[in-house]
Amino acid sequence: QLQLVESGGGLVQPGGSLRLSCAASGYTLVYFAIGWFRQAPGKEREGVSCISNSGRITYADSAKGRFTISRDNAKATVYLEMNTLQPEDTAIYYCAASRSVQRMCPMDPVDYDFWGQGIQVTVSS
């Protein structure tokens, strides 16, 4: 059973940066597409970015130019570097793993099989 644990969240001022990490255990990460999702209070969970098992990357429009996803299979870890953070980025961020073998990783939460517990990111002055 693949287990995922997020870290790196917290409180940051507008314009600041955070790097989230998603550490995997229990199974090799190399076979999975990994996605980052977020859910703000009263809103649906939305895809932020994902990276396929072959390294192909997709970003939501809200993340383009500000966020960078990367994976280190040797360390079984996926990262989300977030820059120029704004209050609207405040949410619980989740990483998730998908068995999808599609060329491009999915951005729909329903396509993901394993989830981390989530971590709070708050952008506020």
Image (cartoon, rainbow, N blue to C red):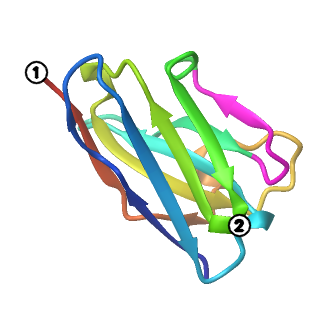
Tag on residue 74?
2
Q: Does the magenta stretch include residue 59?
A: yes
- The amino acid at mark 2 is Ala
**Quadrant the C terminus occupies:** top left
Label number found at residue 125: 1
Image quadrant in which you'd find residue 31: bottom right
For mark 2, give the secondary structure: helix
Q: Position of residue 117 (x, y in %)?
A: 37, 64
In this rendering, the answer to whether 13 lies above or below 49 is: above
- Residue 18 falls left or right of residue 13: right
Asked if 32 appears above or below 61 in the picture, the reply is below
Quadrant of the image occupied by residue 100:
bottom right
Left or right side of 115 for 9: left
**Secondary structure of residue under mark 1:** loop
Q: Position of residue 72 (x, y in %)?
A: 67, 56
Where residue 96 appears, x then y in whole percent? 56, 57
Q: What stretch is highlighted in magenta?
A: 52-60
Q: Which amino acid does label 1 sit on?
A: Ser
